[in-house]
């Protein structure tokens, strides 16, 4: 019971880094439904890096490809700050570089449960 | 032969009976008959012929008549070739050696080239004068013909190898050193035959493959499995690379390991395959993104609709708008589309029923990028649907005016204005629905612009502003 409560997503601050605004909007709505707060959104690499190093958040959703640019440096910056994050990708299978192996990956398109599961993995199981 | 000689009647010949023959003739004849090597003797000025058993197969039809005849008669068919040599020995007492001399003897009533290697030595009488010729001869026709055939087959093989100009054909010894190199290999790899033969085969492998011992692995696989596929980047003498495609095979008929490698330049096919793979990956990515957009539209529509019916209608129209945007992208090879077409398609369903004068569109030709095509298509669709339901297109007299322009110098800006008039009095919406959000948040971020929605009582207006570079199709 206690562990379930701990795993609740309510009130968690989530940073959204996603270059497709429609998907970002879907994430925002889904997160709102889960009781999460959106800590900020970024679509472009530079904004993403800026937010990742300045904002307060519990976990981030990080699209691997931002307008064709790989977002791994953003992930590295978050690792350095011990921030938790979930990779988001449109690819069928994603092979992650060594430092990021074990990071949860959310494959597009995703359902609400996939989103919740990946966030929980990032928050509680790493 | 000895018997044949003894029983022959020699009395009518110039030599007289056997008993009358001089000692040197008898001695030489004994040597001749004892020899296992084809040996003839021509004695006296008439050159009376003797020969031993070893000569019989060579003489064929001439045996046994040639015995006791003058060599000039017995060998009349080839005397033009051998006569002068024999006469020279008789005249000078000096031996003659001839190797593979070509003659055309008559055999079985046919004439064909035959080759002989022979030695003519003088025979002397008791006084030391030249009295005859001692002949040792071997027919070499078969050897000569098979050598010629071999040379011909080698030439033919070489021509085949040299004609395979598009294929490199290279052979290796057990240590992987190059043992042969055809014209195709020269053309493909840039090393001449002289440069390549004797060198390690790894000279045309890439440094990575050299370090990994790929050639050795290929040879081992060819040995163990009978063949090894060679599909990899190879390197020319000048360091450029090409995609080699072929096989490594063990060479047949060798006791020690020998290998044969046949391959060609397949770079173009390889590049096409790589392009194909990239395209498939890109397509997958786009399909996934599109599905995510569809999902986003569907979820928000369902969440905000009052009834199933309303949701169904709204969803259908939104998906059709998205599909039309995609049609444009496909037609434009996914790079973008014409803004005028985007506007026309969004308003199309409402301008077709005979009163297109109520809808006015005007602005310069602008090509906009893929993202802007999708964003503007969805936004204009929401505006048009709203106008048809509640706004200027919901009565008989209202008008919609869509104008766009580009202004400014270095940092050019794009501005599109949607203005409704003549419709029922506008009331601000009680809640922000999908349409409003799609425009105010979705589009604004897609084009990095500002959106102004004004629910003025006399008619809704929407102003969309963005830096031109954010929406323009850069090509």
Image (cartoon, coloured by chain):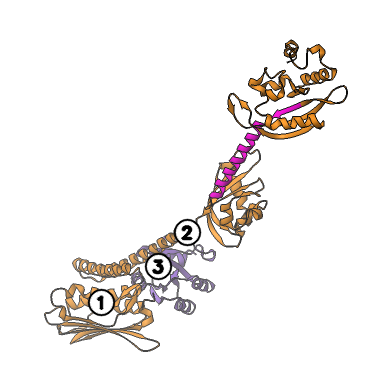
Chain colours: A purple, B orange
- Is B213 on the left or on the right of B26, as rendered? left
Stretch of the chain drawn in magenta: B135-164
Q: Alpha-carbon distance for marks 2 and 1?
A: 42 Å
Q: Nearer the viewer, mark 2 or mark 3?
A: 2
Residue B223, position as x, y percentages in the image: 60, 42
Q: Residues within 10 Å of mark 1 (few under 14, many from 20)?
A: many
Secondary structure under the numbered disc 3 in the rendered image:
loop
Q: What's the mark number on residue B311?
A: none
Residue A91 visible within the image: no
User: On the same chain: label 1 and label 3?
Assistant: no
Q: Which residue is mark 1?
A: B343
The residue mark sitting in front, 2 or 1, is 2
Q: Which mark is residue A8?
A: 3
Within the magenta stretch, is there residue B174? Answer: no
Snapshot quadrant of residue B394: bottom left
Q: Residue furthest right?
A: B127
The answer to whether any part of residue B90 appears in the image is yes
Image-quadrant location for residue B83: top right
Are the residues flagged by discs 1 and 3 in contact, CB closer than 8 Å? Answer: no
């Amino acid at each position: 019971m206690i562990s379930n409560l701990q795993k609740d997503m309510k009130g968690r601050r989530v940073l959204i880094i996603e270059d497709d605004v429609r998907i970002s909007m879907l994430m925002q709505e889904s997160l709102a439904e889960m009781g999460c707060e959106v800590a900020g959104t970024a679509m472009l690499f530079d904004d993403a890096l800026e937010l990742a190093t300045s904002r307060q958040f519990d976990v981030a959703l990080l699209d691997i490809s931002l307008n064709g640019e790989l977002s791994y440096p953003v992930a590295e910056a978050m690792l350095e700050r011990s921030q938790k994050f979930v990779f988001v990708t449109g690819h069928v299978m994603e092979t992650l570089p060594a430092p990021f192996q074990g990071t949860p990956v959310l494959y597009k398109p995703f359902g609400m449960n996939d989103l919740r599961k990946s966030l929980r993995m990032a928050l509680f199981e790493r | 032969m000895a018997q044949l000689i003894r029983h022959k009647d020699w009395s009518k010949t110039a030599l007289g009976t056997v008993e009358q023959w001089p000692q040197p003739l008898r001695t030489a004849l004994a040597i001749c008959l004892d020899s296992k090597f084809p040996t003839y003797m021509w004695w006296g000025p008439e050159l009376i012929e003797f020969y031993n058993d070893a000569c019989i197969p060579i003489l064929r039809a001439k045996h046994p008549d040639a015995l006791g005849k003058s060599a000039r008669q017995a060998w009349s068919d080839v005397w033009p070739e051998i006569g002068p040599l024999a006469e020279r020995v008789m005249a000078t007492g000096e031996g003659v050696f001839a190797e593979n001399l070509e003659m055309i003897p008559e055999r079985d009533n046919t004439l064909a080239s035959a080759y002989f290697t022979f030695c003519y030595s003088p025979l002397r009488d008791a006084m030391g004068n030249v009295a005859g010729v001692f002949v040792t001869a071997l027919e070499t026709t078969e050897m000569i013909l098979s050598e010629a055939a071999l040379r011909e087959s080698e030439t033919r093989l070489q021509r085949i190898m040299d004609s395979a100009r598009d294929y490199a054909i290279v052979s290796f010894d057990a240590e992987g050193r190059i043992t042969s190199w055809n014209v195709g290999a020269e053309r493909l790899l840039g090393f001449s035959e002289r440069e390549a033969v004797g060198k390690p085969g790894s000279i045309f492998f890439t440094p990575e493959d050299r370090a990994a011992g790929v050639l050795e692995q290929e040879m081992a696989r060819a040995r163990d499995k009978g063949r090894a596929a060679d599909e990899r980047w190879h390197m020319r003498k000048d360091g450029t690379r090409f995609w080699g495609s072929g096989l490594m095979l063990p060479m047949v008929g060798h006791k020690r390991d020998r290998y044969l490698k046949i391959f060609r330049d397949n770079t173009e096919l390889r590049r096409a395959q790589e392009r194909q793979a990239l395209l498939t990956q890109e397509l997958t990515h786009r399909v996934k993104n599109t599905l995510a957009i569809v999902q986003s539209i569907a979820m928000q529509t369902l969440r905000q609709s009052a009834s199933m019916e309303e949701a169904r209608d709204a969803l259908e129209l939104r998906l059709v708008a998205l599909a039309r945007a995609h049609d444009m992208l496909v037609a434009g090879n996914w790079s973008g589309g014409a803004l005028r077409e985007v506007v026309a398609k969004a308003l199309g369903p409402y301008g077709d029923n005979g009163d297109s004068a109520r809808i006015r569109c005007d602005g310069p030709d602008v090509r906009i990028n893929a993202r802007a095509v999708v964003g503007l298509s969805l936004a204009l669709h929401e505006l048009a649907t709203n106008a048809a339901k509640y706004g200027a297109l919901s009565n008989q007299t209202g008008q919609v005016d869509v104008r766009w322009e580009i202004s400014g110098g270095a940092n050019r800006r794009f501005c599109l204005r949607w203005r409704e008039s003549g419709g029922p009095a506008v009331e601000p919406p009680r809640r922000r629905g999908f349409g409003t959000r799609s425009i105010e948040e979705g589009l604004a971020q897609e084009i990095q612009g500002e959106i102004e929605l004004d629910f003025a009582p006399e008619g809704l207006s929407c102003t969309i502003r963005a830096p031109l570079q954010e929406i323009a199709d850069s090509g």
